[in-house]
Image (cartoon, rainbow, N blue to C red):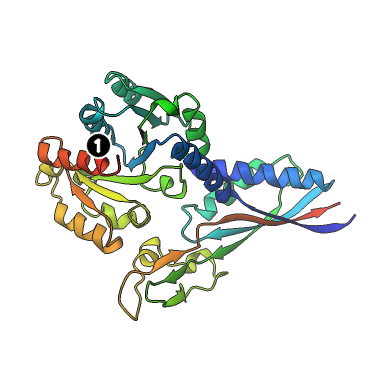
Amino acid sequence: MHEYSLACEIFETVIATADQNKASAVNSITLEIGRLTHVNPDQLLFCLDVLSGDSIAEGAKVNVNFVSPCGECECGYKRDSGVPDNACCDDQQSLYEYALMTCPVCGKLLQLVGGNELIIQTIDIDI
Amino acid sequence: MLMHVVNVNKDVMKANNELAHSNKKLLIKNRVFAMNIMGAIGSGKTTLIEEAINALKDRYRIAVIAGDVVAQMDASRFEKLGVKTVAANTGRECHLDAKLVERSMENIDLEDIDILFIENVGNLICPVDYKLGENVRVVVVSVSEGDDTVLKHPMIFRTSDLAIVNKVDISEAVSADPSKMKADIEKLNPSIPILLTSGNDRISIDRWIEYIESYLE
């Protein structure tokens, strides 16, 4: 289960950044998760919640922005996946649907660009 | 008290990619050809690596990084064949990452090696996100996992360089259709080479070994 180790890495970065900025509390954490990343957001949030207990990040709200891959074809056709980046988790296509997106011009499978991120964007702290 | 938004902008996945890149540079510098062998538990990864070692060890210097959650079973199978073996125990993780491979490579004299097999942890999901610095990613799927396994795990077939459908000799016994699995792989990745193999079919194993040799000088 790699959500736990990813949550550990996120938690350590959040606490280190908060300490550098002499924070007394972390109010919220904003993450960007690529839709092709094999990360279950619910599990990740659960792990983060458990890890941040008894720390200055206890109870911090975690905001998640999802990033969809862009489909590109050799023929030059380009399109986004048709899912708004910030659509909620339940709105996302399955990996299967992403993997089978084809080019409407030449019918070839689209190359998927992006969507593999797990970015800690910002933290909102009290100083 | 002051509320303050701090820009962190750290990509947790990118950190692994950067480490994988430095592993790759180290492997290229030492002229080592590295293969990342991925697949479920029981798909036949260890046997396929053993067959390759037996066929190639007289002509090439070989090392293996054997990834496992715990235990040394696979590592001792490779050691018995007389090749340098490092057991990379992930502890609780479901995949090898670039850091573990970097640490494992510290125990291998890369100058003294031509081929490095990296046997990943038995899993078709998590290894997708973690590049290791390998030259070639190989996914092994056995018919006993069910012939719908390919479409259930699309990304590993999209991101691999070679797909192996293994244990095809028992297809009938497990009610699986290897030609469906091959067609599903082609649907997901039309350019990927696909090998249908069985430990009981020497010709199919020879094709696997020829594939590896095609990368070697």
In the rendered image, which quarter contains the N terminus of chain B?
bottom right
The answer, for residue B120, to whether it is visible in the render is no
The answer, for residue B207, to whether it is visible in the render is yes
Q: Position of residue B163 (x, y in %)?
A: 27, 49
Residue A5 location, quadrant:
top right
Q: Position of residue B155 (x, y in %)?
A: 37, 56
Q: How many marks?
A: 1
Q: In the figure, is residue A116 to the left or right of B127?
A: right
Residue at point 40%, 61% (across, down): A95
Disc 1 on helix, strand or loop?
Answer: loop
Residue at point 46%, 59% (across, down): A36
Q: Nearer the viewer, residue B88 or A124?
A: B88
In the rendered image, which quarter contains the C terminus of chain B?
top left
Residue A86 location, quadrant:
bottom right
Mark 1 neighbour density, 10 Å: few (under 14) some (14–19) many (20 or more)? many
Q: Position of residue B34 (x, y in %)?
A: 38, 38
Question: Three-letter amino acid code at disc 1?
Answer: Gly
Q: In the figure, is residue B21 to the left or right of A58?
A: left
Q: Is residue A103 above or below residue B52?
A: below
Residue at point 71%, 47% (across, down): A14
Residue placed furthest toward the front: B217
Residue that carries the numbered disc 1 in the rendered image: B44
Q: Position of residue A37 (x, y in %)?
A: 48, 55
Mark 1 belongs to chain: B
Q: Is residue A2 above or below residue B115?
A: below
Residue placed furthest toward the bottom: A105
Q: Nearer the viewer, residue B1 or B122?
A: B122
Q: In the figure, is residue B116 to the left or right of B191?
A: right
Residue at point 47%, 23% (across, down): B107
Q: Is residue A54 above or below residue B151?
A: above
